[in-house]
Amino acid sequence: MKRIICSPEAPAAVGPYSQAIEAGGTLYVSGQLPLVPATGEMPEGIEAQARCSLQNIRSILAEAGLTMDNIIKTVVFIKNMDDFAKVNAIYSEFICGEILPARSCVEVARLPKDALVEIEAIAVR
């Protein structure tokens, strides 16, 4: 059985997909653009955008009754690999602890809405 997770504290999907789907105790969080939920605006700069994307993930996890500690895998898409260290610094503010999730980081040519970063996550109960 699968269940849609939709948090009003995260931006609505910008296409035909769900913010997250839970199936079999696993939560699959769609890639989160750095959109401020209240305004739909995107902050400027890679650090602010990374922080916004991670806050959106945290809100979706909370809606499902989970925390950032439940994350087992993330994928970080960045526009410019030169921003890797800056994204890592922000990422480390949100994802820390004894057991860190597996992660991939990929430089991409372009992201929706010309974002500088997009982050997706998988979490378990």
Image (tube, rainbow, N blue to C red):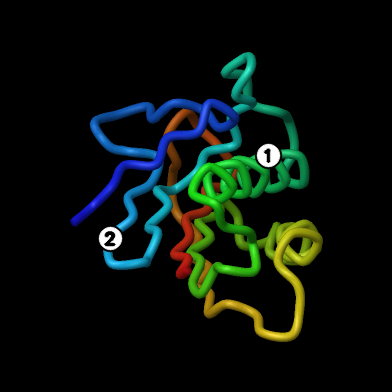
Residue found at the far bottom of this picture = 98
Q: Nearer the viewer, residue 11 or 21?
A: 21
What amino acid does circle 2 point to?
Ala
Residue 24 image point, x, y percent: 28, 67
Q: Nearer the viewer, mark 1 or mark 2?
A: 2
When the figure is inspected, residue 48 is found, relative to residue 77, above or below; the finding is: above
Give x and y (percent) for residue 102: 53, 80
Residue at 64% x, 69% y is 69
- Judged from the image, the secondary structure of the residue bearing numbered disc 1 is helix
Q: Are marks 1 and 2 in contact (CB under 8 Å)?
A: no
Which of the two residues, 114 or 43, is positioned nearer the viewer here? 43
Which sits in the foreground, 22 or 49? 22
Q: Which mark is residue 14?
A: none
Q: Residue at x 39, y 41 (%)?
A: 5
Q: Residues within 10 Å of mark 2 (few under 14, many from 20)?
A: few
The tag on residue 52 is 1
Decide if residue 48 is on the left or right side of residue 76.
Answer: right
Q: Tell which circle, 1 or 2, labels the residue nearer the N-terminal end.
A: 2
Secondary structure category for the residue under label 2: strand
Q: Nearer the viewer, residue 64 or 38?
A: 64
List the residue tagged with mark 2.
23
Q: Amino acid at mark 1?
A: Cys
In the image, residue 77 lies at what x, y percent? 50, 56
For mark 1, does the 10 Å Cα neighbourhood hold few (<14), some (14 to 19), or many (20 or more) residues? many
Q: Relative to 2, say whether 125 is above or below.
A: below
